[in-house]
Image (tube, coloured by chain):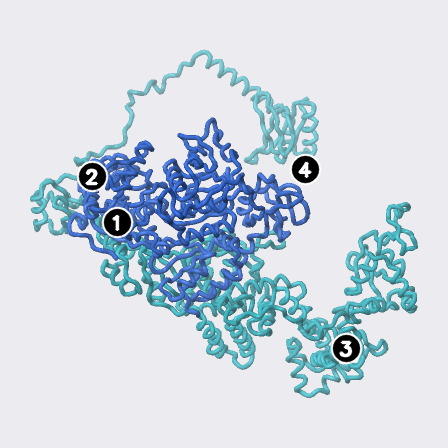
Amino acid sequence: MSTSLADHLRSLPDESLAALLQLRPDLVVPVPADMAALAIRAQSRVSVSRALDGLDQFTLQIMDAARLTRDPADGTTSVDGVLALATIGPNPPAPTAVRAAVDRLRARFLLYGPDSALHLVGGIDEISPYPAGLGRPATELDPRTAALCADPAKLRRTLLAAPPSARAILDRLAAGPPVGSVPPGALQAPAVGADDDLPPDDTNGGAATGSPVRWLVDHRLLVRVSGGKGGTTGMVELPREIGLLLRRETGPLGPLRSSPPEVAATPREPKAADSAGAGQTMEVVRHTEALLEQLAAEPAPVLRSGGLGVRDLRRLARATGSDESTAALLLEVAYAAGLTGEMELPGTAGRYGADQQVLPTAGYEMWRAGSLAQRWEQLARAWLTMTRQVGLVGQRDDRDRPITVLSAEAERAGAPAARRAVLGVLAELEPASAPSVEEVLALLDWQAPRRSRGRENTHREVLAEAATLGVTGLGALTSYGRLLLLAEATASEHGATDDPLGLLAEAEDGGSAVRALDTLLPAPVDHFLVQADLTVVVPGPPEPALAAELEVVAEPESAGGASVHRITTSSVRRALDAGYSADDLHDLFRRRSRTPVPQGLTYLVDDAARKHGGLRIGSAGAYLRSDDEALLAEVLADRRVEALALRRLAPTVLVTPYQGGRLLSVLREAGYAPVAEDATGATVLTRPKTRRAPARVSVASRALDPLATPRLPLPRLLGVVEQMRRGDAVARAARRAPAVVRGTTPDGPTPAHGHHEALAVLQQAVRDRALVWVGYVDAHGATASRLVRPVSLGAGYLRAEDERTEMLHTFALHRITAAVLEK
Amino acid sequence: MSGGPLIVQSDKTLLLEIDHPDAQACRMAIAPFAELERSPEHVHTYRLTPLGLWNARAAGHDAEGVVDALIKYSRYPVPHALLVDVAETMDRYGRLQLANDPAHGLVLRALDRVVLVEVAKSRKLAGMLGNKIDDDTIQVHPSERGRLKQALLKLGWPAEDLAGYVDGEAHPIELAEAGKDGGKPWTLRSYQREAVEAFWAGGSGVVVLPCGAGKTLVGAAAMAEAKATTLILVTNTVAGRQWKRELIARTSLTEEEIGEYSGERKEIRPVTIATYQVLTSRRGGAFTHLDLFGARDWGLVVYDEVHLLPAPIFRFTADLQARRRLGLTATLVREDGREGDVFSLIGPKRYDAPWKDIESQGWIAPAECVEVRVTLTDAERMAYATAEAEERYRMAATARTKLPVVRALLDRHPDEQTLVIGAYIDQLHQLGEYLDAPIVQGSTTNKERERLFDAFRTGEIRTLVISKVGNFSIDLPEAAVAIQVSGTFGSRQEEAQRLGRVLRPKADGRQAHFYTVVSRDTIDTEYAAHRQRFLAEQGYAYTIVDADDVLGPPLPTVD
């Protein structure tokens, strides 16, 4: 068959081949050597599987129809056959729709050949063994079942006789997939007498049914097949014929839907959807900026395992007033957009590399300078293309560790495709129609069932994220969101072919979404309203200059569409500190305010300015004070002390930048009589200091003549005697130690053997509380021996009592070379 | 962009630009669900709170309407997330209902089974719920009705109380609008009428009206509506006597029908006025006067000054859920933040009118607020600078330098009834001596107090020096000028009360004046800043002048 596909491919014009390669781009990576290679690759399991992934539910069902109508002899089918099978059901699809589906399959070379002899691409049976969710024909499964299927009347009777529980199983298997696993033991005959506990079942001739699966197997409606991986658990399969019979109501292929499911959603007012989305974009940009400002003020450390800690995330979320999932999303997006980055903490380089922290990058400055719409567009594009699944943050990974923000665990290569798929669904609907989440999932399921199944959660997350980011509003795709998607799609197409440098995408595509959003967003305002309660309301996004001014003179109180600031004494003081004068502030309020400046504010500014700078701080090396003002005036005027750069702070105080010592000596030289004082004001007296060596003790204080023999009292002498006797005994005992213990015998047992024996001896000695000679190697490697009474043996140590010294010794067992019982 | 008057902030505050042509319409649209937080001259701030949204829901507004109002009047796009949040919050009210089941008595019924399962599992409700009747209904012990509502509010699933009320013992009460005992005929003001109607339609709840707007009459009208025995709870005896006087004058009730239940007298009559103090007094750890609540089959319980309701009264109120309850207050803001308890136990807010609006309708004299800053003498400054931290406020507030300023202010209004208010007894005595005016303080007997007030009312006494007792529920109808020399640490509540003193309706629409005398560069100024903020937020013109301007040339006029 593969040769025939190759032949078929060879006979095609170049355009058709190019069209095939466009539909199945994976065929040219790498470029096949010849047509045969292309044919082989086109029939490979991986490639076919990919081709099927992109197909909608209906086309896949038509593919199944083609498989079911295959001629068992030569494996071909025909368009007419497919058409006939597909239109059996109660709501048959239009033949044109079926033909269109067949054409789609042919374009991808999943079917090929003339209408009357369509070939199926090889490898398809490996990918899904059960076409249309139907089992194998009975003849392939079990001859007795085949016999039953061959007799339609009997088959129908048997089916009708099935008890309700068994019928439910049949219906489930008929809907597909046609195989089910059976709990262990369900197929075994019940123990004798167990049947008595079961309710009698009239359909089963009055006898109890027992397990419905067993009933079905016993009546040949289900066939046992070898189990999957376990092998021990039984699997049952519903033969194709019975499946088809059970599908009388729905048609052999199951319910067919040639067009995507309808969306019943109430269409929103396009303006309302745009407006809600635009409101959300403002929130997103503002929250992102707040998050990054927070990061700039206090960078978050990167965990050793990657990502930011849960506590840091919580802190950031709290500081910006958003919830944790939103904060996680914005952090991920900002990172993807290149607005934040890691930096090594200086001085922490160690064995595991330096500690890192996350903080805004230089790109953040550029971003901040952009308009609201531009900033949003950067974030949204980063979101569309980032390979991160933020919904995983906060969940636990395989090893039950929490997945953190920016960690590698949340990386998912399929994330951009999932976003494109979900938003694509929204984009294909009427503008501003807002399908429910379930409807979106149903649409996705129809569009590419093989891709969507099992990804429902991911798709839900995408919808939630799109709403958070303002790509959608009130559940509908916004007009600027649509433009963004369009720009993104064309950019990725162009990027590959016509515009390898990506210049065009930058220049024109980004713009339309930004422009569309710009018209929805409030224009920056350059004025505010001041009120008597000292709040300043900026009725819109402030101009950068206004924002900078307000940042200095007022405290932010509430943000959103407008911003509310409060002027307090401390904020005015801050402005004064920053170099504003009271007049500047009055002028600022008069110039910017659309409302008359309240008297209270004017008073506050004047009052704060009056007090501002009432205390002065400076630094000085030393001061010179005197109650005699005239004397100080004289010093100040004295040219001999000019070098001290004295300055008068008060009539009675002069200061100099130089140290006190210098001041003192210069003034003394000039003939004044200054005295130094310490920090408490006490006079510091200075006298010449005489040098001295450290103190020593006189010999006269020594009590005794060093040469005189000390006289000891009797008790001490007796003690000395006892000590000597004990030493003597030790010496004798050491001599008495057996040679093997002393380690002096050259022909003694090998150390290993000796060690082994020693342990046995010691164990015995512990039991008998007997005295033992222990030979051991001490910490310095010298051999020594000791006569001891072992107390215990365990944990690698011997604890033993030395009766002579009355001490408890601990010996490491591995150091003991020998042990001999004392005879 | 619609260019509307409303700006929705992400912290759920709403800024309403009142100079905008649509401002009035917008205010009407958002008033049901947003709480007015500040009303300075140009931009009013409203806040969306769960309580406010539930109040709106209780009054029959739905989330769709709220969202529509926000979108319609908003100048800028409203964030999607905020709209979702509003809808979800509103949706939580009424998922659970307290109802009377003919067979099982009081039951908690769920319109959403999942919610019932969730709350039934909560530990906070342990012991309050009885048997499960079916999947959607759980029996509730009648004595737990209040506590259950409290707990459900805390869980964020406020229940709608549809269980109804007992009628109580009937007692004929009529409003004497034709005038009584030769008095002049009068009528309820329109907003009072609306307040009573809103209350009666809702069953139980709170009416918010500023001081001087005639809350007592709202209470009287509610009684006339109920026509049943009534228990009135007031803050103190003086307020109680005032209620009594008002009720005798404005309704068909006679002196014999109204009892006073206080520290001095223990009368229980068809209409009984009790003080919070006597109800919360304990002997041996037990509340001794609780029997009052069960002494008669009360048909209506009126709570005066709900924002001051002491915590134990909440507990008693939890047991009174089958009786109609009317709360009266000038502000729902409680210093202890127990607004939620007021909501669940007394009832949702039924009527609210911003002060400024009532004023513009002409009921309350417009007040001019002036802060006079006094520069302390050097000796006083020195004493202040070296004083202990806890002594500082007293030192600053009671500076003798304030006395001549007060005298000068009095001289500016020679023909007006003037109150001089202070917190420190010594200072009050100084003032009394200096100004030659009588003093009302805590130790003044009720009899003497009433004598002085009567004399003040008749104009016999022109200047009265009062202490903190003046903060609560006394009626001084013709006080046109108030001078505050010291207060208690800039409390918002106190400020509202004090302003209320001088905001009583004037016969001839003269302007009221509210002066505070403050020592410059001291902690006194800081407290004054709080006061300024509060008054400005309430929309009053606020001016700061130097004492020298008061003592010297005439005051600058403020319009």
**To which residue does mark 4 refer?**
A752
Q: Chain of mark 4?
A: A
Of residues A235 and B224, the one nearer the viewer is B224
- How much space separates mark 1 and mark 2, taking CA atoms? 20 Å
Q: Residue at x 46, y 72 (%)?
A: A517
Q: What is the display colour for chain A?
A: cyan
> What amino acid is at disc 2?
Leu
Closer to the camera in the image, A633 or B510: B510
Q: Are marks 2 and 4 in contact (CB under 8 Å)?
A: no
Mark 2 belongs to chain: B
Q: Is residue B177 visible?
A: yes
Q: Amino acid at mark 3?
A: Leu
Classify mark 4: helix, strand or loop: helix
The residue to which callout 2 is attached is B435
Q: Residue at x 50, y 15 (%)?
A: A721
Question: Disc 4 marks which amino acid?
Answer: Ala
Callout in the foreground (2, 4): 2
Callouts 3 and 4 close, C-beta under 8 Å = no
Q: Give me the disc on residue A120.
A: 3
Residue B109 location in percent, x, y? 62, 49
Q: Label 1, label 3: how many angstroms apart (C-alpha)?
A: 94 Å
Q: Do marks 3 and 4 share a chain?
A: yes
Chain assignment, label 3: A
Label 1 SS: strand
Q: Are marks 1 and 2 on the same chain?
A: yes
Instruction: Tell me how far mark 2 sits from mark 3, CA to CA.
Output: 112 Å
Q: Is residue B113 left or right of residue B367?
A: right
C-alpha separation, residue under disc 1 versus residue under disc 4 = 101 Å
Check the picture and name the quadrant holding the C terminus of chain A: top right
Q: Which residue is mark 1?
A: B371
Please identify, in this view, whether the residue under mark 1 or under mark 2 is nearer the observer.
2
Q: Please tell me which residue is depicted at 64% across the width and 52% down the height of the picture.
A: B113
